[in-house]
Amino acid sequence: MAHLTCDQAEILLNLRLDGQLDGADWGRADLGRADAARLDAHLAACPACQAVWAELEALNTTLAALPDAPVPPVVLSGVLARVPGPAPAPAPANVRPWWRWLLGGGLALEAAIAALLLWLNWPLASSFAQGLVPTAVIDAAGRQVTDGIGAWASWLGAQAALVQAQWQAFSAQVSSLAPASPAPELVVQAIILLAAVLAVWVAGNRVLATISIQ
Amino acid sequence: MSGGERGLVQAAQAGDREAFAELVRRYQGRIYNMALRMTANPETAADLAQESFLRAYAALPRFDAAWPLAPWLFTITANLCRSWLTRRRLPTLSLDLPVTIDGEPVPREVPDERPAPDQLVEQQDLADRIRREIAGLPLEYRLVVELRHFGDLSYDEIAQTLDIPLSDVKSRLFRGRRKLRERLGDVWHT
């Protein structure tokens, strides 16, 4: 059996440290066994290589016992920030579906206010309501005097005349107001009617805005 | 690979972000510390660890969940570290080349800039010193030592990871350990 040099022995000691010498599958089992035997013979007679083996074992133990440094939180957060997330959630909780506004208190309250204002202003509103549904006019003999279009034209004319008359009456009332006199009924009715229209307008805008958010 | 880990990998491959987050939590310590030992710079190590996981995530659909995840992650990290160190490394004079004056070889005299042992004791603990000594190894030795001792990869796996012959794995490991023994000898002999 040829003797090993110290350099050769050190190579085999490294293999032994990694479990690549004793009992390792080299394809030629006799080779591993022969090298192991030569190494053992060399070690028995070489204090320097015994020291090398001791250092290799110590190095192995030292590296295995090396504690991990704490991981900065930025590693995980940085990775997750750049990894695509799950599919976006449906609608945020603070945006309600538009139809809920119809059932919800907001629109119902505004409709109630509008209805109350119209009821308070019924004398004036009824004058508009009388001509809301223009139809063909049938005379006493059963003949059609005007068709539907003609009825609409007549209604629009009547409404224009009514607004003009009311405006004139309102102007006359305002011009004759004395500073200490109470507000005339027509002014009160106009204010109430304006408030009713405003309430309906606000409710309608809210519905439109809610739908557009969806 | 354990059943639990395989399930996590498969879930992550199916797009489960939380499963991937759990894999990152499990391996971030080993991956970050590997990068730290390779670069000796905590900020760079954090950047390289993040990049390693992001590359793993991108390549995850092509990963076979039947294989162990750790060697694959170490491979990604080792190659990233090698690439980063190669790009950033300043030109250095090889200490292995002989010095000649007028054609005659002379002994190389290299000042030892490492702190004296008593200074080391004052400045940092043993773990820091070991990390620094590892980081001070030549890159090719460092990679092999890292993958063998901390990645627990076999010779064959190291050869495959670094795309080098098996004989180079053995010789680099031999030389890397010898340098570490020389530098850390005082630790065991005091």
Image: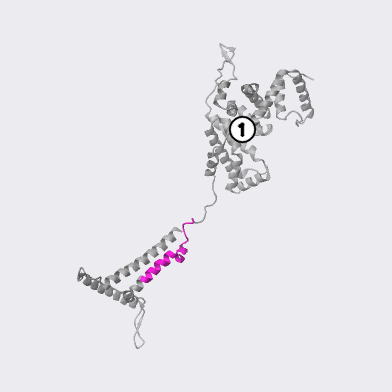
Q: Chain of mark 1?
A: A
Helix, strand or loop at disc 1?
loop
Tell me the residue that label 1 is attached to: A67
Residue found 43% across the figure and 60% down from its top: A210
Q: Is the residue marked by circle 1 packed among few (<14), some (14-19), or many (20+) residues within 10 Å?
A: few
Q: How many marks?
A: 1
Residue B21 location, quadrant: top right
Q: Is residue A188 left or right of residue B179?
A: left
Residue A166 location, quadrant: bottom left
Where is residue A26? Give x, y as percent.
75, 30
Residue found 65% across the figure and 47% down from its top: B7
Where is residue B25? Give x, y as percent.
59, 42
Instruction: Tell me which segment is drawn in magenta.
Output: A92-116
Secondary structure mostly seen in the magenta stretch: helix
Look at the picture and state if A121 lies above or below A53: below
Tell which residue pokes out farthest to the bottom in this image.
A141
Residue A12 location, quadrant: top right
Residue found 62% across the figure and 27% down from its top: B141
Does the magenta segment cover residue A164?
A: no
Residue found 46% across the figure and 66% down from its top: A103
Look at the picture and state if B109 lies above or below B161: above
Where is residue A58? Give x, y as percent.
67, 26
Q: Amino acid at mark 1?
A: Pro
